[in-house]
Amino acid sequence: MSDDAKDEAPSDEESGSGNGSAGPPIIELKGIGKTYYRGKERLDVLKDLDLTIAEGSFEALMGPSGSGKSTLLNLIAGLDTASTGTIRVAGADLNAMSDGERAKWRASTIGFVFQTYNLMPVLTALENVELPLLLTNLGSAERKTRAKTALKVVGLEDRMDHHPRQLSGGQEQRVTIARAIVTDPKIIVADEPTGDLDRENADEILNLLDKLNQEFNKTIVMVTHDPAAADRATQLRQLDKGALK
Amino acid sequence: MNLGTLAVKNVLRNKTRTIMTVVAVAVALVAFILLQTVLTAWTAAADAAAKDRIASRHKVSWVMSLPLKYVSDIEQVPGVQKAAPFVWFGGKDPNHEDEFFATIAVDPPKFLEVYDEIQVEPAEREEWLQNRRGALVGDVIAKKLGWKVGDKVTIVGQIYGGDWEFHVSGIYTAKRRSVDRSTLWFHWDYLNESLSGRRKDQVGWIVARIDDPGRSAEISKAIDAKFEERDIQTLTMSERALQTSFLGMVSAVLKALNVVSFVILLIMVLILGNTVAMGVRERTNEYGVLRAIGFMPKHIVAFVLGEAVTIGALGAIVGIALSYPMVERGLGRFIEENMGSYFPYFRIAPSTLVTAAVLAMALGLVAAAIPAFRASKLDVVDSLRRVG
């Protein structure tokens, strides 16, 4: 973590609350703007947005479609760059990094959970979870051990040889979460993690995210339309027309 | 699991499409291998030519003859061991009008000395040397036309008209591929005694065996120099050059075949490129996920290229597995027996198989280059938005 991040304590409004393990800021966005151009048409998706998220918090981002939630999540995750402003996440200045540097940074710092799971259909659950570890220097046996541990955390140790098509939606999402945590990242970003699930499976996934936050002290930033999902977060933020309300 | 595992597993993802593509690549390679084998078979005689033989012909053209005396003149050139005359007779078997085989008049003792790779039973050899109307026949054409030792055969002369009767004195094989096993050799004396005027005592070309293959060019020069001041000059060349000059007449066809074989490979590239491009398009979202979790553009390139090389390698394996037995166990023998004059040895050269396998994989890389480049340049966020 950078000195800047250590020095600046989050305000009550900005930082996560209600989580005993919430710590110093891990995500700091200042004056963020994101503009897209569709032909000559200018589209300001995010406007002069400031946001600070404390380490160990569980944040939910809500808002109507087109409000900029996913864009904000992509910026935090280092998938995209801001048009204006500065982004510091886990001590790194994302706007100052090259594409390659951001890719390496993502591999070690961010775990991704997508709405549509996005598992590789040709790989087994174990191989899917092992995938991010291929970018590390770990040996094959160690990679397998870690992947098995991650699957155990999400309660799928008995499904490791199954392919995604042999799993239910809830199980697929749990594999995605195992893949997200296998590299032990500080932050997990989840884009509508329960969007494709029924209530029962959605609750299981939310329990799992809770567990990761409470027991493993992962900082979780979740975009959701689901009020029940938002209720699990320790901090709820509403986004509208590119600005936090 | 490693990075290659994903590429290989992706190949088997759409089995029908992969099988169709592998079959297409294999068929293209079979065509390539067969065409290349035609080319190597056609030039096999030249490739197998003896290095210690040189041939002299009329300086102007093959169709013009040399005086018989030139044979003994050439034998006097230092470095020449023995010289043998040849005359292209151009005969046909009236019972097999469509069957082409060479009929050549030679001086038997000299011929057998200069072409010592000819193999014939001693008794048959003796019979041929003694019998003025004797013919030495290649085993391939003898088998095809049903000729046996002792048979009388009638050949119709195309250049030297009339019916010519021969006794099959012997059937030969050869130790070297430079000798066509579909030729009928007979006594030059038998031909010459029937000729008169300017056609008498003439030969078509003269082949000499030399004592030092390293002096081939020097001796050839000396022979040509010997006749420089005479009415008829010679052009002397190595046996390989002689064979190649025969090929020169069909060089355009050979070039066309070579071009066609590479056009086939180009079609293979397009088929493979299309398959890879479809796969990349379908997996855009997955590449987005890989990029999101930290894979670099170079990894995406490796996945795509790995997939294409795998398909190319599978196509090469199938193509070689089909073409090798096809030629070795059927087609090769059939062609040698039925088209022996053109293809005395029709077998796939190991270098052709290696070339085909390497090209299949290399062209797989070429075919996948553009899709791989595009996949590596995909915007991560845009890719994640795409479904399926």
Image (tube, coloured by chain):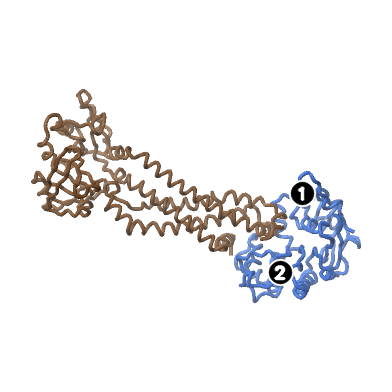
Q: Is residue B260 above or below residue A236?
A: above
Label 1 SS:
helix
Colour brown maps to chain: B
Q: Quadrant of residue A58?
A: bottom right
Numbered disc 2: secondary structure: helix
* Residue B208 shown left or right of residue B46 in the figure: left
Residue B209 picture quarter: top left
Which sits in the foreground, A198 or A156? A198
Q: Chain of mark 1?
A: A
Q: Position of residue B51 (x, y in %)?
A: 27, 41
* Quadrant of the rendering where the N terminus of chain B is positioned: bottom right
Crowdedness of circle 1 by 10 Å Cα count: few (<14), some, many (20+)?
Answer: few
Question: In this figure, which residue is indicated by the disc labeled 1?
Answer: A96
Q: Tell me, yes or no, if residue B192 can be seen here.
A: yes
Residue at image coords 14%, 51%: B170
- Identity of the residue drawn at 30% across and 37% down: B245
Which residue is situated farthest in the top direction here? B229
Q: Quadrant of the C terminus of chain B?
A: bottom right
Say which amino acid is labelled 1: Ala
Q: Is residue B313 left or right of residue A5?
A: left
**Residue A171, position as x, y percentages in the image:** 69, 72
Q: Which chain is blue?
A: A
Q: Nearer the viewer, residue B381 or B100?
A: B100
Query: Closer to the camera, A66 or A141?
Result: A66
Residue that badge 2 annotates? A173
- Chain assignment, label 2: A
Judge the density around disc 2: few (<14), some (14-19), many (≥20) Cα neighbours within 10 Å.
Answer: many
**Horizontally, is B325 left or right of B371 in the view?**
left
